[in-house]
């Protein structure tokens, strides 16, 4: 590697090696370079104007932590063994996991040992929570400070190449969660080098990443190049872009549109599909609109309203941002249009929110879930629905998710109803920072209605305690419980139906509808029968604990392809069910094996 760094305001830049400093030469455009190649494994750092040696802003490897020297990583040393044609994430089943909590040792190498389980479940794409190096040993990953690197605790960059190769060998795609909207509070030395941040825009983390002020051209390149390298050097298939609504950019071309166009060109060059999925709170279809039409060109975007509609209806929760959710009509709007707030008043925000999804938009452009790292982990105690709901209600949620017209995403352990909590954990070695995070989380606990849900004596776990992290690890021994094993089999069956029945695989929102026999609204968990129409297929979902008779239009052309519970069919057009239960009727001659 030839040492090279952007430091436009510097008068001198040195590369600092183990036993010497070498002066770099101004290379134009604020860049400084050296013509001596540093081999793989060499530790190095940069000093600006005689200051302290700092890690490379484009560091791929931080083996000694985020405050120490970078190490040269040569991605071409890895010999890829898998021949992989790629995968487009749209319509496929995603599985979100945190490397540190997915296994006992919390490494990418150990995670490889569980990939066959995901194949057996029917997963198509493994989505890894952020891997960028951060200060400390354990954390969610959203406080990373080296977006070109891989946290050493997980195995470093070489371990990620091996993980992707092993996933591809099993027919699994890999999506990497990346964060470009901010850097963590400890180990962020970017301002030493140049104007990476601007006070022109503010975000929840302070000054915004500089995407449109002086010096923004190179900062945009730093962002875009950090994304492109995961596709080239690590062969990942997709990136999930964190909180893109905080990428404040008033340029003529939004940085996401620039990224989309460059990824499309790279996809053509590599000959395999590459996907970008945006997490955005805006409920604005601009995210998936083509760049030629003024959109951002994302392959897909998260649609949290679907989660809220399902969760609030099944659990009866109405606190915080669930206030506008929980009714059957709201669930129908979510399942047929992705956005519940599409220009309507958001009571939680206090303003009208969102915009309608244009007619004809492929439902597969929206990634939906009934559990994910945010919706579980940002609860006061990190408790999963499985702590409160009977397994039958979890089976209903699974059917609404996996048989929806969207791109479904599972959260690790969801498939067996894991009861291990997914709590917010962040190991900050700086005591003052750890205190600020702890107090901040306690403030959030009081501000979102969690105390009312859990009781006045509930205590929020300390994010910096190792026990908070350890208690969030999956316990695979739970699957020894027959009820949990049956739920995992149910997930597997639903995924199989989604793959084998065209009506259930479709992303056609116009061919989706929801009717119900029960109240429009309820003060608590909703009780009654829902009928989800997916083309010619019907999914009958009963909640509560009552028996019900359900009319099945066109039932003489449909067969029971799967059921949770024991439905009775006295005639082709009538189904007798007992809640909680699910019955899937399809035109198929027989259910999949």
Image (cartoon, rainbow, N blue to C red):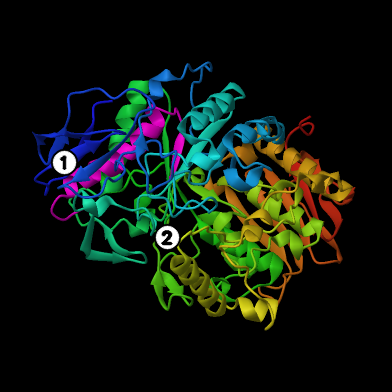
Residue 267 image-quadrant placement: top left
Along the horizontal axis of the image, is 172 left or right of 470?
left
N-terminal of the pair, mark 1 or mark 2, is 1
Mark 1 and mark 2 in contact? Answer it, CB < 8 Å: no
Q: Which residue is mark 1?
A: 13
Residue 361, compared with residue 345, is above or below; it is above
Measure the C-alpha gap from mark 1 to mark 2.
45 Å
Magenta-drawn stretch contains 305: no
- On the image, the x and y values in percent for residue 36 come to 21, 23
Residue 287, compared with residue 325, is above or below; it is above
Residue 40, compared with residue 526, is above or below; it is above
Q: Residue at x 70, y 65 (%)?
A: 314
Q: Residue at x 24, y 64 (%)?
A: 201
For the N terminus, the quadrant is top left
SS of the residue under disc 2: loop
Label drawn at residue 316: none
For the C terminus, the quadrant is top right
Q: Which residues are magenta?
A: 211-240
Q: Which residue is mark 2?
A: 283
- On the image, the x and y values in percent for residue 286 come to 34, 53
């Amino acid at each position: 590697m030839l040492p090279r760094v952007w430091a436009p305001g510097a008068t001198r830049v040195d590369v600092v090696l183990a036993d010497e400093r070498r002066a770099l030469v101004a290379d134009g455009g604020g860049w400084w370079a050296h013509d001596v190649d540093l081999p793989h494994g060499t530790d190095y750092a940069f000093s600006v104007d005689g200051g302290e040696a700092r890690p490379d802003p484009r560091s791929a490897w931080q083996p000694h932590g985020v405050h120490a020297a970078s190490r040269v990583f040569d991605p071409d040393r890895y010999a890829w063994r898998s021949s992989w044609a790629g995968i487009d994430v749209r319509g496929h089943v995603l599985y979100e996991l945190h490397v540190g909590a997915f296994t006992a040792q919390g490494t990418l190498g150990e995670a490889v040992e569980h990939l066959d389980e995901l194949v057996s479940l029917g997963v198509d794409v493994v989505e890894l929570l952020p891997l960028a190096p951060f200060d400390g040993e354990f954390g969610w990953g959203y406080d990373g400070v080296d977006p070109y690197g891989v946290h050493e605790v997980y195995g470093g960059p070489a371990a990620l190449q091996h993980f992707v190769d092993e996933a591809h060998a099993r027919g699994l795609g890999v999506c990497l969660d990346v964060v470009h909207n901010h850097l963590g509070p400890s180990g962020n030395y970017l301002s030493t080098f140049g104007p990476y941040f601007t006070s022109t825009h503010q975000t929840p983390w302070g000054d915004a990443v500089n995407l449109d002020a002086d010096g923004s051209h190179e900062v945009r390149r730093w962002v875009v190049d950090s994304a492109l390298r995961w596709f080239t050097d690590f062969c990942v298939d997709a990136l999930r872009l964190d909180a893109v609504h905080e990428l404040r950019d008033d340029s003529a071309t939004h940085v996401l549109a620039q990224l989309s166009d460059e990824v499309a060109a790279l996809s053509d060059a590599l000959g395999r599909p590459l996907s970008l999925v945006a997490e955005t709170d805006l409920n604005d279809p601009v995210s998936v609109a083509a760049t030629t039409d003024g959109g951002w060109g994302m392959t897909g975007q998260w649609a949290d309203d679907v989660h809220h509609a399902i969760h609030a209806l099944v659990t009866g929760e109405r606190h915080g941002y669930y206030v506008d959710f929980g009714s059957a009509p709201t669930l129908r709007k979510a399942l047929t249009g992705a956005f519940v707030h599409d220009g309507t008043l958001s009571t939680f925000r206090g303003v009208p929110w969102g915009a309608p999804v244009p007619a004809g938009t492929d439902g597969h452009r929206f990634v939906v879930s009934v559990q994910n790292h945010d919706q579980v982990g940002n609860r006061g105690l990190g408790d999963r629905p499985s702590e409160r709901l009977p397994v039958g209600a979890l089976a209903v949620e699974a059917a609404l998710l996996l048989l929806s017209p969207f791109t479904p995403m599972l959260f690790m352990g969801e498939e067996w109803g894991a009861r291990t909590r997914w709590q917010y954990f962040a190991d900050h070695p700086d005591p003052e920072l750890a205190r600020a995070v702890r107090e901040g989380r306690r403030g959030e606990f009081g501000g979102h209605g969690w105390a009312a849900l859990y009781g006045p004596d509930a205590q929020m776990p300390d994010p910096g305690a190792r026990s908070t992290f350890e208690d969030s690890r999956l316990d695979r021994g739970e699957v020894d419980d027959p009820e949990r094993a049956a739920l995992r089999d149910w997930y597997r069956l639903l995924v199989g139906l989604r793959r084998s029945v065209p009506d259930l695989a479709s992303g056609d929102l116009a061919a989706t509808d929801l009717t119900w026999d029960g109240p429009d609204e309820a003060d608590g968990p909703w009780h009654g029968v829902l009928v989800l129409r997916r083309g010619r297929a019907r999914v009958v979902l009963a909640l509560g604990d009552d028996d019900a008779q359900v009319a099945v239009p066109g039932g003489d052309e449909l067969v029971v392809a799967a059921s949770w519970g024991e439905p009775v069919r006295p005639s082709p057009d009538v189904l007798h069910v007992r809640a909680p239960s699910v019955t899937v009727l399809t035109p198929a001659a027989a259910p999949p094996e």
